[in-house]
């Protein structure tokens, strides 16, 4: 699912579920192009990113969604409503590394793994030089909510800036869910009992993940 902002020309949040990946499944071929989403009033297109200096950054990842949900779902990750401007060094290095870890390392640890992700913006508004409709994020968040076989919930979250180096350690960008909520303005785990929600959103505990 995606919550999209026509005002910013970006998805503000994307949520998807990962499960342990299937074994011996051949990866699907990457689609040749990105496509406009008819539900997007501004009709952002792939050409809006040409010569912008930014990659078309997936929020719901191509590879994991293709592997778990098939070709049609994979093609939906190439809709422009799932895309946000990412610097090439981030998109092709650290962000891609995190996407690989969440599928290959995080997902097998849990019965199911929910991922919330999206861009973060500061108070200075900057648009792509190639499109006045697409705002450039300052950073990106990932929130992982892992549900164990026992029903116990584990969480992990990151805020990764646009200028992150490709060889940075992911642990450098660990934050609490409270911090993501402060920066994004969203309340992610509101359906949980308040006592459980408050504990999970406050702590930073990587012991169940790495």
Image: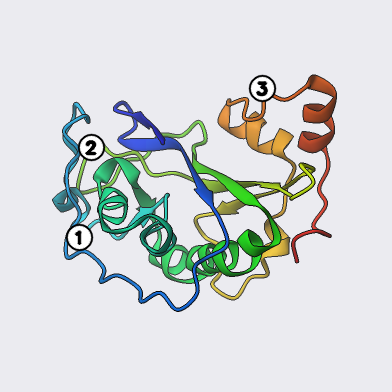
Q: Of tags 1 and 3, which is closer to the observer? A: 3
Q: How crowded is mark 3: few (under 14 residues within 10 Å), some or many (20 or more)?
A: few
Q: How crowded is mark 1: few (under 14 residues within 10 Å), some or many (20 or more)?
A: few
> Where is 45 relative to 124, above or below?
below
Q: Are marks 1 and 2 in contact (CB under 8 Å)?
A: no
Note whether residue 142 is visible.
no
What is the quadrant of residue 29 in the picture?
Answer: bottom left
Q: How crowded is mark 2: few (under 14 residues within 10 Å), some or many (20 or more)?
A: few
Q: Separation of disc 1 and disc 3 at Cα?
A: 43 Å
Tell me which label, 1 or 3, sits earlier in the chain: 1
Percent from the top left, x then y, of residue 119? 47, 42
Q: Is mark 2 on a helix, strand or loop?
A: loop
Is residue 8 shown left or right of residue 146? Answer: left
Question: Could you tell me which quadrant the C terminus lies in?
Answer: bottom right
Q: Of tags 2 and 3, which is closer to the observer? A: 3
Q: Separation of disc 1 and disc 2 at Cα?
A: 14 Å
Percent from the top left, x then y, of residue 165? 56, 69
Percent from the top left, x then y, of residue 134? 29, 39
In the image, 33 versus 6, the foreground residue is: 33
The residue under label 2 is 132
Q: Separation of disc 2 and disc 3 at Cα?
A: 37 Å
The residue under label 3 is 191
């Amino acid at each position: 699912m995606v919550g999209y902002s026509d005002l910013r020309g970006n998805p503000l949040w994307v949520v998807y579920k990962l499960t342990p990946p299937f074994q011996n499944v051949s990866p699907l071929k990457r689609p040749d192009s990105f496509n406009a989403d008819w539900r997007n009033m501004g009709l952002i297109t792939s050409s809006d990113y040409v010569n912008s200096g930014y990659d078309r950054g997936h929020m719901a990842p191509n590879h994991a969604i293709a592997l778990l949900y098939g070709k049609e779902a994979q093609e939906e990750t190439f809709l422009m409503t799932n895309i946000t401007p990412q610097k090439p060094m981030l998109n092709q290095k650290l962000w891609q590394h995190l996407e690989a870890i969440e599928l290959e390392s995080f997902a097998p640890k849990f019965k199911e793994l929910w991922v919330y992700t999206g861009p973060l913006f500061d108070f200075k508004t900057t648009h792509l030089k190639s499109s006045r409709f697409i705002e450039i994020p300052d950073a990106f968040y990932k929130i992982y909510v892992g549900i164990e076989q026992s029903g116990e919930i584990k969480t992990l979250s990151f805020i990764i800036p646009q200028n992150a180096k490709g060889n940075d350690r992911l642990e450098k960008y660990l934050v609490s869910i409270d911090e993501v909520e402060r920066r994004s303005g969203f309340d992610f785990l509101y359906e949980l009992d308040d006592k459980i929600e408050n504990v999970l959103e406050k702590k930073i505990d990587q012991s169940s993940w790495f």
